[in-house]
Image: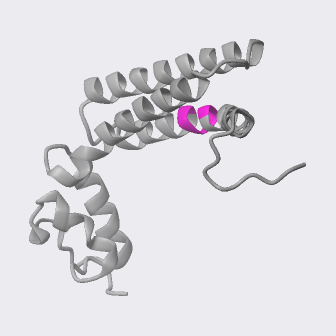
Amino acid sequence: MALLPVGSESPDVKAKQVTLLFSHLPVILLATSLNSAILTLALWNHASHRVLVSWLICIQLTALLRCVLLLTYRRNPEGESWGRWFSLGTWVSGILWFCRGAPVCSGIGSASDFFDVRARRNVGGSGDNPFCQLSRCSGVPASRFATTNHPAV
C-alpha cells in the first residue's frame, strides 16, 4: 500500500473519504433525531409550540432525506457527487440547528430565559460567575433573575 501525500487529489483517496463519511452517518442521524426531540421537550414550556414543532419537523425531515441518501449510496457507491450530497445534507442540518439556537443569544425567544434561569439557580444567583454568561448575550437584565433563596456557592 503506497502512502499518498496529505491533500492528495487521488480518486481512491476521495472515494475512501466519502466511504468513511457515509459509514458514520447512521450514528449521526440517530443522534440528530434523539437530540432534537430532547431539545424540543426541554424547551416545550419556554418557547412557542408552533416554532418548536416546525423546527422538529424540519430536522426530522432532513434526517429522513439523509437516510434516503445513505441507502442510495449503499446501493451504488460509485460516482463523484456523493461527497457533495453529503456536504449539502450537513449544511442543511447545521443551518437548522443554528436556527434553533439563534434565539438563545438574540433575546427574541424565551429560550434565553430558560437557560439563564437554569444557570442562575445552579450557582446561587450570582451574576459574576462563568455559568451566568448566557445572560450577557440574551439581553435579559441580571436583576430579573437575582434570587436570595439560594446560598452562594
- In the rendered image, the vertical position of residue 25 relative to residue 133, given as above or below: above
Q: Which quarter of the figure has residue 14?
A: top right
Q: Is 97 situated left or right of 133 in this image?
A: right
Looking at the image, which residue is at 72% across and 18% down? 78
Q: Residue 69: x and y, percent?
A: 61, 17
Instruction: Tell me what residue is drawn at x 60 percent, y 32 percent.
Output: 29
Residue 30 part of the magenta-drawn span: yes
Q: Give percent across and percent down for residue 151.
A: 32, 85
Q: Which of 70 and 43 is in front in this view?
A: 70
The range drawn in magenta is 29-33
Colour scheme of the picture: one colour
Where's the C terminus, which quadrant? bottom left
**Residue 107 left/right relative to 122:** left
Q: Where is residue 37 in the image (x, y as percent from the top left)?
A: 49, 34
Residue appearing at x 53%, y 23% in the figure: 85
Please say if 39 is above or below 140: above
Q: Provide the major secondary structure of the magenta segment.
A: helix
Which residue is rendered at x = 33% and y = 22% of the image?
54
Please determine whether, in this image, residue 10 is positioned above or below residue 144: above
Q: Total marks drawn?
A: 0
Q: In which quarter of the image is residue 5?
A: bottom right
